[in-house]
Image (cartoon, grey):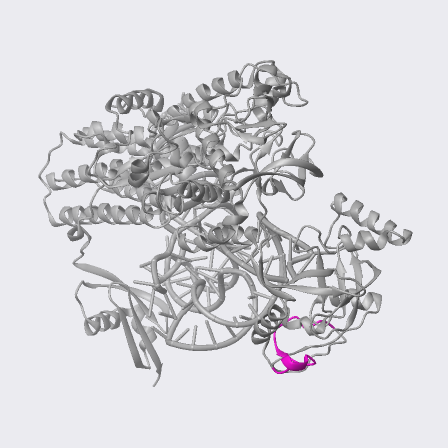
Amino acid sequence: MSERYSAQEIEARWQQKWDEAGIDAASEDDARPPYYCLVMFPYPSGNLHMGHVRNYCLGDAVARYKRMQGFNVLHPIGWDAFGLPAENAAIKHHRPPAEWTYANIDQMRGQLKQLGLSYDWNREIATCHPDYYRWEQWLFTRLMEKGLAYQSNAEVNWCGSCHTVLANEQVVDGVCWRCDTPVIRKNLKQWFIRITNYAEELLNDLDQLPGWPEKVIGMQRNWIGKSSGAEVSFGLEDSDETLNIFTTRPDTLMGVTYMAVAAGHALAIKAAEHNPELTAFLDECSRISTKEADVETMEKRGMPTGFYAIHPISGEKVPVWVANFVLMGYGTGAVMSVPAHDQRDFEFARKYDLSIKQVIKPAEDDWDIETAAFTDVGILINSGRFDGLTSDDAKQAITTWLSGHNRGNERVQYRLRDWLVSRQRYWGAPIPVIHCEDCGAVSVPDDQLPVELPTHLQPTGGASPLCECDAFKHVYCPQCGKPALRELDTFDTFMESSWYMNRYVSPRHTEAMVDAEAMRRWAPVDQYIGGVEHAVLHLLYARFYHKLMRDAGLFTAEQGGDEPFKNLLTQGMVLKDGAKMSKSKGNTVDPNAIIEHFGADTARLFTLFAAPPDRDLEWNDAGVEGAHRFLSRVWRLLQRADTDGDADSNTSSDQTDAAAVKAIRRSIHTTIKKVTHAFEHGFAFNVAIAALMELANSLQAFEPASVAGKTAYQEGLQALSTMLAPFAPHFACEIGARLGMEKMAVVSNWPQVDEAALEQDEITLVVQIQGKKRGEITIAKNAGQNEAMMAAQADASINKWLDGMQTVKVILVPGRLLNIVVKPV
RNA sequence: GCCGGGAUGGUGGAACUGGUAGACACACGGGACUUAAAAUCCCGAGGACUUAACUGUCCGUGCGGGUUCGACUCCCGCUCCCGGUACCA
C-alpha cells in the first residue's frame, strides 16, 4: 500500500461523520463536568481571514482537548451581525443590509465548517435577529426604570465618515476606531448607560480575575482611572460664589499660590466679558483643543482672570488664572496650583513669575526648590498647624479639617465616562423608546417588544433611512395615546456583543433573556479567546453588562457569577512581512486557498505551531509546507506499520530490541506528559506540537524487530494520533481508524501517562567541574553520590580536571547532574 | 511620565519550581535514490580559536554589576523595541 496523504479526500468525510454522531453538541443533561469554551464571535464580513482562523483553531484545540478529558463542553458560535459595513455594502451593491448580512453568514458558516471546528451549531445565533435583540431592548427598559439609562445633552464624539456618534472607548488616538476619521466634538442629545455607577465594582472585580492577562487588567484599570483625593472649596473675593477643585494631594494645600481654570470654565467666561484680550485667548484655547495638537509639546500658556480666590485654611488671596492645560471635562475644570510640588505648576509659575511656596520637605536630603518641583511625599513645613505631619497623615488631617469647616471633603474621581449607546445608524437594534410631546421619552411596553427593525430599507449614505420610514416613525404614545415619534437612533453594536456569551447558554429561551438554571450550569465562560484589541471595548462592556443582567435579577451571582469570563487568552495578530494582514496593504493570505491546497488540518496545525498563542504570528508559506510534511510523515509511519506487519519475526528478541522497546515506550509517555502539561499550562500549543513531532521522529527511527516492538510501535502511533486530535482532527480520526481504534480519535479518552514506562534503569548524568560541563556518565538509576563520583573519576576526560585538585564539595542533583567543586591542592 | 510585555543561532521559537542553552520547525549546506527532477531518506550546522583528528580550549541568551557549587531563569542598575495610557490635577 502506498497511498498518499490526501486531506481533500479525508476531511469532508470525517466532518460528515462527526455531524451524524452529534459529538459537538453540548448536553444539558449530563453527569460530566461542564466546560464553557468561547471564541469571540465574528462580524459576518463575508470572508474569513487568518485572524479568525487562528482564533478559532485555538478555541477548537481547547474545546476538543477538554472533551477528550471527559468534560461536557459548550463551544458555541454565532454572528455579530449588526454594524456599519452592512450599510456601506448596501449602498454599494443596492441590496438591503439584511440580505447582504445573511448571505455572508451562509458563506462564512461554510468556511467554518470546512475548517472542521467543533461548534454546537444548534446554538448558533445572529444578533440582528429580533429574538435576540428583543432582550436587549427589554433590559434597556429596565435600565431606564432604574435611571441607569438616560438621555442627555452633552459634548460627544462625532465621526463624519460613519455619520454617527461614538463612545469614548471607540475613539482611538483621536480617530474613529473603525474608519480612522478624525473625531470631532459635537453637542448632541444622546442615550447613555451609567457605567460610572459600576466603576468601583468593575475596578475591584479585576482582582477576581487571576486567569486574565496582566496587560488587559492593567489597561482596564487605567481606563477606569480611579484617583482618590479631596474636593476643596475656595472662596472668591467679593463674591458669595466658590471655586471648587479636585486634588489628589490635599497635603500640599498650604502651598497653593494660584488657581487655574479651564477656558470653558464659568469663571473664565465671566472674566472675559469685559476683556477682549482674554476673550481672544479663550477662543484660541478652544480652537487648539479641537485641533488635537500634540499635547505633549504644546506650550503651557495662561492669562490672569483678575479674580482672586480665598484659601480655605489660611484665608490668603491667590490669583485665578486661565490655563490651556486645564481640561473642562475632568474633575471640576479647575485646579489648585502648587508650583513647589507639581512640575507643571512649577513651570507655569516660572514662566509667569508666580510665587513658589515649599510646604513638603523630603524625609531625607535637601531639595533645591529653585530647580524643580519636589513631587514626592515627605514632611509638611510652612503649613501652620499641619507642620511636622507626613504627607499621608496630612492628607487625612487636612481633608478632615476641610470637611469640618464645610470647605471640602474626600472625593474619588474616575476617568471612565458613561457609555454612549445611541447611534445615528440604520443597521442596528432599535432603541425601544417613543418620544411624546407631553410625556417625554417613554419606553416601549414589554408586551410590544421587540421593536422590530424594518429590514427592507435601502441606506443612501446620509441620514438613517429610518428617518424617512413613516410606518416606523409615526406611532402613538404608550402612556397618553397621542401621536408620537419613535426614537430613530439604534444601539451601538457593542450592546449586542456584550451579552451574547450569556445567551448561548439558553439560545432559544423565550421566557427571558437567559435561563437562570442554564446560567448555573455553564456560566461564567471557563475560557474566552480573542484579540487584545477589545481590552477596553468589548471586554469592559461585557463585564459591565454581566453585572447589569445580574442586578436585573436574571441570575444571581451564585448562578452566573459576578464576572462573565473566568479565563481570558488574548491571541496575537497574524502578520505577513512584519505587518498586520490587511486588504489595504495587500499582504493577506486567503484561508480558503490554504485549505484547498493543503487541507484544513495543515492550516490548523501551522497556525498553532508557528508561535505561542499570545504572541504575534508571522505567516510563512514554507512553514505551512512544513506542517503538511509532518502530517505526510506520520501518514507514512502508519503505512510502515502495515507493511512491516507480515515480517512477524520474533527472531531477534535479544536485549538490544528490549532496550529499544523500553526507549520508545519511554518516549511515548514522555510525550504524553509534555503535551498534557502544555494544555494545562498556558495552552503552549507550539510546544505540544513540537513534542508530537519529536515522537514521530522517534517512531520513525525505531525499527520494531519483535512482537513487543510492534506492539510498542502501535501504541506510539495510537498515542500520536489521539494527541493530534485537538489540532488536526480529521487526520487524527483517519489514522486512528486505520490503526483499528474503536472510537473516533476526537472522542477518545486523552492518553494517560504510564509512570512505569518513564522509569529508567540507567541514567545519564551531566558532570560539571566548578559548574562547567566536562562530560557525561551513565550510571544506575539509584546510584548514590559515591558511585557517581567513581564513575566520574573513571572517565578520563572528566578526571583530567580533577588532577592535582582537592574536592571541596560535591552536589548531586538526582537524575540531572553531578557538580564537583575543587580547588588546587 | 506611568502601566504591561519583550530582547535567545540566518529565521520562528524551546528550556518544568535556578541544574547539559539552542528542543521542534523553517531556511541553508552535503550526501543517497533517480537518466534527470520532484518527493523521500541520511548527515551537518551558535561563534572564535586550535588539532593529523568529528582533538582540545575559550566565548556565548540586549548591556553593566551581584547572589550561587551552578543564572536565559533570582536581585540591583541601565539600553533598546512593542502595546496601552495621559496636560487626569
What is the magenta range? A372-388
In the image, residue A338 lies in the stretch drawn in magenta: no
Q: How many marks?
A: 0
- The one of A634 and A501 positioned closer to us in this rendering: A501
Q: Is residue A604 left or right of residue A749?
A: right
The residue shown at (32%, 26%) is A5
- The one of A638 and A118 positioned closer to us in this rendering: A118
Main SS category, magenta section: loop
The residue shown at (46%, 55%) is A204
- Is A452 rendered above or below residue A351? above
Q: Quadrant of the N terminus of chain A?
A: top left
The residue shown at (62%, 36%) is A190
- Is B60 rendered above or below residue A83? below
Q: Residue furthest bottom?
A: A825
Q: Position of residue A777 (x, y in %)?
A: 25, 64
- Is A158 rendered above or below residue A483? below
Q: Position of residue A540 (x, y in %)?
A: 50, 44
Q: Quadrant of residue A818?
A: bottom left
Q: Quadrant of the C terminus of chain A?
A: bottom left
Q: Quadrant of residue A121?
A: top left
The residue shown at (42%, 23%) is A109
Q: Is residue A666 left or right of residue A13?
A: left
Q: Position of residue A556 (x, y in %)?
A: 35, 44
- The one of A391 and A525 positioned closer to us in this rendering: A391
**Is residue A300 at all visible to an observer of this figure?**
no
Q: Position of residue A768 (x, y in %)?
A: 33, 69
Q: Quadrant of residue A254?
A: bottom right
**Is residue A673 at all visible to an observer of this figure?**
yes
In the image, residue A381 lies in the stretch drawn in magenta: yes
